[in-house]
Amino acid sequence: MQAKTHSRRDFVKRAALLPFCGAAAFSVSTAEARPPVKRSGGAALKVSLNAYSFSKLLNDYNLDRGQGISLMALLDFCAKNDFDAIDPTGYFFPGYPQVPADDYINTFKRTAFEYGLGISGTGVRNNFTPSDKTERAAGVQLVKDWVAVAAKLGAP
């Protein structure tokens, strides 16, 4: 039977692991010692409806393809079903990709407020990859225009 010899290289490898072992032992001991976080009330998780969930109905309404649902009616749905907020996704606003008039934006925002709904965000279609500079610039401008709409809506 041959005795195992230890080299300096083996020693350095093992010594390099010592800080990790110490850190692991420290984190286990301190994790047990910490009291749980105390909350004043329930969890901060809120439920928001993304308008894309109603894509077919919203498009049917906007494109006059039969019975559908308007973005304003979707606010009513959210309120009746106890959602905390809505993400109205820009391309369901009437006239998209054109920015809606301020009176529509303000009416939407006011209605959401009256229903107790927050506006959790909004999105637009975008493509920043076309090789044509004019097309790419138009895509960038579209997003800038809709960022302004999101700001008017109070969306984060």
Image (cartoon, rainbow, N blue to C red):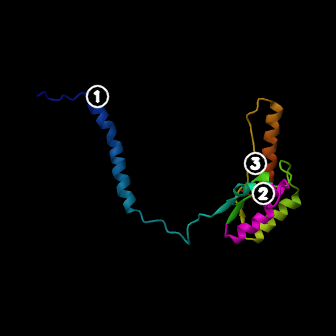
- The disc placed on residue 58 is 2
**Amino acid found under the numbered disc labelled 2:** Leu
Percent position (x, y) of residue 102? 87, 58
Check disc 1 and report the residue beneath it. Answer: 9
How crowded is the residue under tag 3: few (<14 C-alpha within 10 Å), some, or many (20+)?
some
User: From which residue to which does the magenta span run?
Assistant: 60-83
Q: Residue at x 73, y 50 (%)?
A: 123
Q: Nearer the viewer, mark 1 or mark 2?
A: 2
Percent position (x, y) of residue 69? 79, 62
How crowded is the residue under tag 2: few (<14 C-alpha within 10 Å), some, or many (20+)?
many
| Residue 56 is a magenta residue | no
Q: Quadrant of residue 41?
A: bottom right
Apparent side of residue 142 relative to residue 119 in the rendered image (left or right):
right
Q: Earlier in the sequence, mark 1 or mark 3?
A: 1
Label 3's element?
Answer: loop
Query: Residue farthest to the left?
Result: 1
Label 1's element?
Answer: helix
Q: Earlier in the sequence, mark 1 or mark 2?
A: 1
Q: Nearer the viewer, mark 1 or mark 3?
A: 3
Percent position (x, y) of residue 131? 77, 29
How crowded is the residue under tag 1: few (<14 C-alpha within 10 Å), some, or many (20+)?
few
Work out which quarter of the rendered image holds the C terminus and state it: bottom right
Distance, label 3 to label 2, CA atoms, is 15 Å
